[in-house]
Structure formats: C-alpha cells, structure tokens
Amino acid sequence: MRNFVRECKEKKLTIGFVPTMGAFHEGHLSLIRQARKETDIVIISIFINPLQFSALEDYDTYPRQLEKDIKLAKQENVDCVFAPSVHEMYPKGFLTKIEQDVLPEKLCGAFRPGHFSGVMCVVLKLFNIIQPDIAYFGQKDYQQFVIIKRMVLDLNVNVQLRMLPTVREKSGLAVSSRNVYLKKRERQEATNIYRALKEGEKMIRQGETSAAKVVARMKSIVRQIKGVKIDYVVVANASTLEPVNEIKGKVLLAIAAKIGKARLIDNILVP
Ligand code: AMP
C-alpha cells in the first residue's frame, strides 16, 4: 500500500479515499463516484474494525462479501482496494488509543461506549497509510463526520474531508449494510424513521421553535414501529451535537432506534 501511495505521490497524482466496512450499497458507491470525479487515483478500504464494536454488538455477524465488493469496486473504476487483516492493523503489542472530549459522548456515543474512539483510531491509521488528498464520508453517520473533522483539525492531519448526502431507498429508508438484518415487515415500518425526520423538519420550517414539541411529534411517529426500542430522538446543535431547547439557526434532527436485530440511525440537517 505504501509503495503504491509513494508512486502516486511521485507522479503528482491526487488520491481520493473512501473508508468502508464493505457490503457495498448505493451509499458507498456514491462516495466512490464522487472520489472518481474529483481525484486522479481512488483508493477504498474494506475493513471491519473490531475496535469500534462492543462485545455485545454485531462484529461476528456483520455482512462480509469481499469478492463481490471487489467486483463492484472494479465496475466503478476504483484503482486500489485496501483490505488488511485485523492482525495487520492491530498486531500483537498494539497499545495506542485515540480519545476526544465531548463529541464522542453525545448521541450514539452514549449508547456505544468506546465506539468513536475505535473509529478515530482506524481512520487515523488509514489516513497515515494512504495519505489521501481528499477523504469521503456519508452524512448518514453525521456524528462520525463531525468527530473526524475535529480530529483532523486538532492533530493537523493533511487531508480534506467531504461529506456527501445520505442515499435513500424510494421509501425514504437510508440504505445501510445493516438493513439486511430487517425482516420484510420491519423494513416497511423502518421508513417511519425518515418520515419522523421529515415531519420534524416540516414543523421547524413552519415556525415551530420548541425542540420538545418537535421531538414529541417525531417520537410518536417512530413509536408506531412495532417493537421498536428508541435510543434517541433529538434536535441538536449541528456543530456541538448538544440537544437544544429553543430552535434557532441550523439544527440536526437525529434518530437511533433498534428494530428487530438492526440498530438504525438517520438524520437530517435543517438550516
Ligand atoms: P460503512 O461501511 O457503513 O462504515 O460506511 C462507509 C461510508 O459510507 C461512511 O462514510 C458512511 O457514512 C457512508 N454511508 C453509509 N451509508 C450511507 C448512505 N445511505 N448514504 C451515503 N453514505 C453512506
């Protein structure tokens, strides 16, 4: 990987990088296509990072389809797929941790302790290995993007970051590798998550300034999903991720909920 990166740099070719955990869907492909448009060389990584899963989460069952992903990457004219083993990324003796204050404790962080520390660690390692000019992320994982942006600023990492819109099914459901965990009925009802976000957005656009009222309405829509377990439904400051009381300026509407075996997240930004 390092030799390939060195050759690209010597030829003054720009590198676009898309980090992923594989099981490609249209969300991943949209990032790859944007990288293809903006940079000379497109490198993607496929690595299911054990550090970002807790013992109770789905590391073992997370969908794995490396051969199929490589085919899809070829179709998109990706130049290089970096798919290291866990042992290569975290050899015996690995001890270092990346921590950040405040942001990783908000939203999903409250329900997934250590998750964003694991994300920062793998992303920083990948940035160091691949040294991309531009790295591409999806808005679907908005908190991840905000945390990585902060890390890049704080640690002077020499990379530009792009956040691209969430790709959705026709139903509005955000495409996700974890949607395969959903049964047919669950998948239909999961569309209530995006419906709730759009309803919250509508209320705000119509002048509602009480976050409590918007949250209550969004929750009532999410609760229509049979057996749903809500982790959070919030109106938050888009920069600090802190829940707001009064809505003024740009806000993030964000939802995380467990439906059957899947923990789904989604969000929209309301200017
Ligand atoms: P993952 O493989 O789930 O770690 O995701 C890899 C990248 O794809 C991350 O930057 C995600 O935010 C992004 N991504 C995942 N789902 C979507 C989606 N529905 N639309 C756009 N980007 C996405």
Image (cartoon, rainbow, N blue to C red):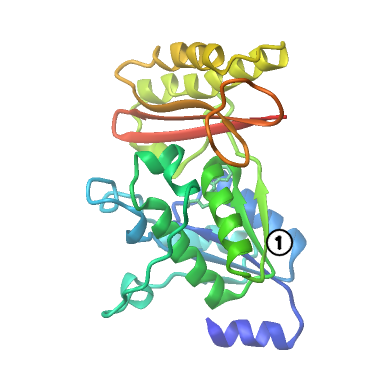
Callout 1: SS: helix
Q: How many marks?
A: 1
Rendered position, 220 above or below 119: above
Left or right: 247 in relation to 23: right
Observer able to see residue 28: yes
The residue lying toward the viewer, choosing from 254 and 96, is 96
Q: Can residue 46 be seen in this view?
A: no
State whether label 1 is within 8 Å of ligand 1.
no
Q: Quadrant of the C terminus?
A: top right
Nearer to us in this view, 16 or 232: 232
User: Horizontal and vertical percent for residue 117?
Assistant: 41, 57
Q: For the residue marked with disc 1, what is the amino acid?
A: Arg
Question: Which residue is outermost to the left?
Answer: 55
Note whether 244 is above or below 118 in the view shown.
above
Image location of residue 250, percent across then percent down: 69, 31
| Residue found 62% across the figure and 41% down from its top | 239
**Which of the 4 image quadrants contains residue 230?**
top left
What residue is at 62 percent from the left and 70 percent from the top? 157
Residue 51, located in which quarter of the rendered image? bottom left
Q: Which residue is drawn at 46% across and 35% down?
A: 265
Q: Position of residue 121 (x, y in %)?
A: 44, 65
Circle 1 crowding by C-alpha within 10 Å: few under 14, some 14–19, many from 20: many
Instruction: Looking at the picture, tell me which residue is in the foreground, 115 or 264.
Output: 115
Drawn side of residue 103 relative to residue 4, left or right = left
Q: With respect to residue 173, does 38 lie above or below?
A: below
The residue lying toward the viewer, choosing from 32 and 269, is 269
**Above or below — where is 175 with respect to 16?**
above
Q: Name the residue under label 1.
A: 36
